Image: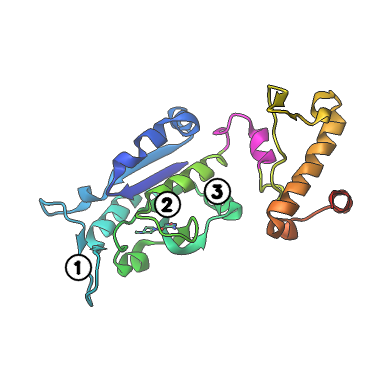
Amino acid sequence: MWIGVVTIFPELFGAFLSTSLIGRARQSGRLQIEVRDLRDFTDDPHRVVDDEPYGGGGGMVMTAPPWLRAVRELSAGRSPRRVLLSPQGRRLDDAKVQELAAEPELLLLCGRYEGIDERVRELVVDEEVSIGDYVLSGGELPAMVLVEAVSRCVPGVVQQQSSVERDSFRSGLLDHPHYTRPAVVEGLAVPPVLLSGDHAAIERWREREALRATATKRPDLLAAAPLTAEQRAVLETCK
Ligand code: 4HQ
């Protein structure tokens, strides 16, 4: 998969893109990520990318010309889906992540200041995506969130593909609790079934705890999850 990113702060992506899972995926060639500085697409020597808003008011607005040039140059010879990170977008969820991961090419636009001239959206943006209802200073962190979530869906990026399938949300449920050594932490013991060696019993416990966690922490998810009759019965015994 190819992902292009346009930003005025390309350095923010350095450690993120060279560390851990994403670093390895890039080295193996499964992920090709091209981060470009918006200022490289200006034609004035001062590399200015913002101006005062028409109609007045505070703050600055990112001008259209560098964005149009950046998007068109990075789209030359490919046809990436062009995504603008913005609080006005549709909220990112697992369904959207999987939909974006099915694209061979994505181009992510990271704005700053009060935002980008509206005509950029009209001319070269396919869709807006938000990572949540709160205000950030720029689209860079949302772009990293999107890159990380999407990358996990690209075949071979997560070494254990079984862990992607087991992942939270794929089932519509939250994960069960996890425990590791030591067996007792400040008087709190590991649930004995996990030490029993009885794999079927452990599987039943995990399923039950996943249902319980979802019911108590995210009842909204539970309402939307397609539960089997057996899962409904187990859920009854958790109450
Ligand atoms: N932004 N999800 C970039 C966000 C945001 C979000 C605010 C995007 C500032 C310039 N983006 N502008 N939440 O808060 O995606």
Query: Which amino acid, by three-letter code, is at mark 2?
Result: Pro
Question: Of label 1 and label 2, which has the lower sequence position?
Answer: 1
Q: Which residue is mark 2?
A: 80
Residue flagged by tag 1: what amino acid is it?
Glu
Q: Which residues are magenta?
A: 155-167
**Residue 117 forms part of the magenta stretch:** no
Identify the residue under disc 3. Answer: 102
Query: Going by the image, does 6 lie left or right of 28?
Result: left
Rendering coords of residue 220 (x, y %): 69, 60
Coordinates of residue 6 in the picture (x, y in percent): 32, 49
Question: In the displayed structure, does residue 232 sit left or right of residue 116?
Answer: right
Residue extending farthest front = 187
In depth, the one of 146 and 32 nearer the eye is 146
Q: Tell me the element at label 2.
A: loop
- Quarter occupied by residue 82: bottom left
Q: Which residue is mark 1?
A: 52
The tag earlier along the polypeptide, 3 or 2, is 2
| Position of 139 relative to 188 (above/below) | below
Query: Residue 221 sits in which quadrant?
Result: bottom right
